[in-house]
Image: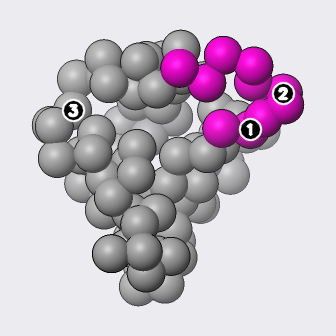
Amino acid sequence: MRGFWYDKAFFLSKLHKNVYLDITGLPPSRLLRYFPELEKISSKVVFGSDWPAIVDIKKNIEAIKALPISQDARLNILGQNAIRLLALK
């Protein structure tokens, strides 16, 4: 049933300028299975730690860095989008 929600979340993030995809709590190794076109919306994807449920945050970050997506997409997902959204830059 989750696949339905992944599809809807992806669609809504593409459709609406102010809707972002939060991947907090999703296993990074499965992101491209859930969102095969993740790179196309990488400027609208936000990574969160899901702490304290996820204790080894570094492991998740490394898994995202290992995804077969561009370096720009990785940088966006792992921080640039959050910086832009929070107007920290």
Locate residue 34, reporting x and y percent: 51, 34
What amino acid type should be assigned to the residue bearing mark 2? Ala
Report the residue marked by disc 3.
69
Locate residue 49, reporting x and y percent: 65, 38
What amino acid type should be assigned to the residue bearing mark 3? Ile
Say if the magenta span includes residue 56: yes
- Left or right position of 76 against 25: left
Taking the image as drawn, is residue 37 in sight?
A: no
Quote the CA–CA distance across marks 2 and 1: 6 Å
Q: Residue at x 53, y 14 (%)?
A: 59
Where is 27 relative to 34, above or below? Answer: above
Characterize the local packing of mark 3: few (<14), some (14-19) or many (20 or more) Cα atoms within 10 angstroms: some
What is the span of residues highlighted in magenta in the rendered image?
A: 49-58
Q: Nearer the viewer, mark 1 or mark 3?
A: 1
Q: Which mark is residue 50?
A: 1
Whether tag 2 and tag 1 are in contact, CB under 8 A, the answer is yes
Characterize the local packing of mark 1: few (<14), some (14-19) or many (20 or more) Cα atoms within 10 angstroms: few
Report the residue marked by disc 2.
53
How many numbered circles does the render carry?
3
Q: Which mark is residue 39?
A: none
* Closer-to-camera residue (57/21): 57
- Left or right position of 54 against 38: right
Whether tag 3 and tag 2 are in contact, CB under 8 A, the answer is no
- The residue tagged with tag 2: helix, strand or loop? loop
Quote the CA–CA distance across marks 3 and 2: 26 Å
Say if the magenta span includes residue 86: no
Characterize the local packing of mark 2: few (<14), some (14-19) or many (20 or more) Cα atoms within 10 angstroms: few
Q: Nearer the viewer, mark 3 or mark 2?
A: 2
Where, quadrant-wise, is the C terminus in this rendering? bottom left
* Closer-to-camera residue (23/16): 23
Where is 84 relative to 30, above or below? Answer: below
What amino acid type should be assigned to the residue bearing mark 1? Asp
